[in-house]
Image (cartoon, rainbow, N blue to C red):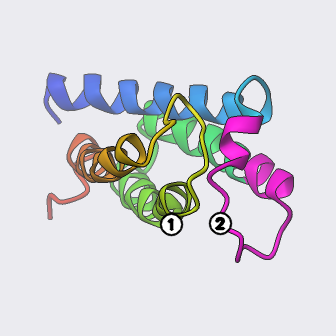
Amino acid sequence: MTASQTIARIGLGGALVFAGIGHLTFARDDFRAQVPRWVPLSEDATVLASGVVEIVLGAAIASGIAHKRVGRFAAAFFVAVFPGNLSQWRNHRDAFGLDSDLKRLLRLPMQVPLIAVALWSTGALDD
């Protein structure tokens, strides 16, 4: 693993922990705006559960434990939460300063770099 991969992995892990804490505290209302209506749990339960997953996932990524497996799981997680971003755009829900359809639409492709960093920084594609 290169120094740049390690730095990116620790940065991604820290960002996930921070986002997870936001799910549980200061950004809880904003995260509710991303929960698709078809999710069978309440918006609040979904936000809390995904926040816990993000904290655990972020800590695991930053620690380097089972890095390839965790990197693949993180990439799958970013794919799994994409419908929330799509739902926010399709349902015209303001959150995180995304107060127009254009801003919400422009945010959608940002999931791709997150997936790429999760895979690259953990060496998940090296086999």
- Disc on res. 3: none
- The C terminus sits in image quarter: bottom left
Write down the residue under mark 1: 83
Question: Callout 1, which amino acid?
Answer: Pro
User: How much space separates mark 1 and mark 2, taking CA atoms?
Assistant: 7 Å
Q: Nearer the viewer, residue 78 or 10?
A: 78
| Residue drawn at point x = 59 percent, y = 32 percent | 19
The local crowd at label 1, few if under 14, some if 14 to 19, many if 20 or more residues have their Cα within 10 Å, is: some
User: Is residue 91 something one can see in this rendering?
Assistant: yes
Q: Nearer the viewer, residue 34 or 98?
A: 98
| Residue drawn at point x = 17 percent, y = 36 percent | 1
Q: Label 2 near label 1: C-beta < 8 Å?
A: yes
User: Is residue 77 something one can see in this rendering?
Assistant: no
| Residue drawn at point x = 73 percent, y = 48 percent | 32
Q: Position of residue 71 (x, y in %)?
A: 37, 52
| Residue drawn at point x = 67 percent, y = 48 percent | 33
Write down the residue under mark 2: 36
Q: Position of residue 113 (x, y in %)?
A: 24, 45
Helix, strand, or loop for circle 2?
loop
- On whether residue 30 falls in the magenta region, the answer is yes
Q: Classify residue 68 as left or right of residue 46.
A: left
Question: Callout 2, which amino acid?
Answer: Pro
Q: Position of residue 27 (x, y in %)?
A: 70, 29
In the image, residue 120 sits, relative to residue 27, either above or below, namely: below
Segment tinted magenta in the rendering: 29-49
In the image, residue 90 sits, relative to residue 102, either above or below, namely: below
Q: Nearer the viewer, residue 61 or 66?
A: 61
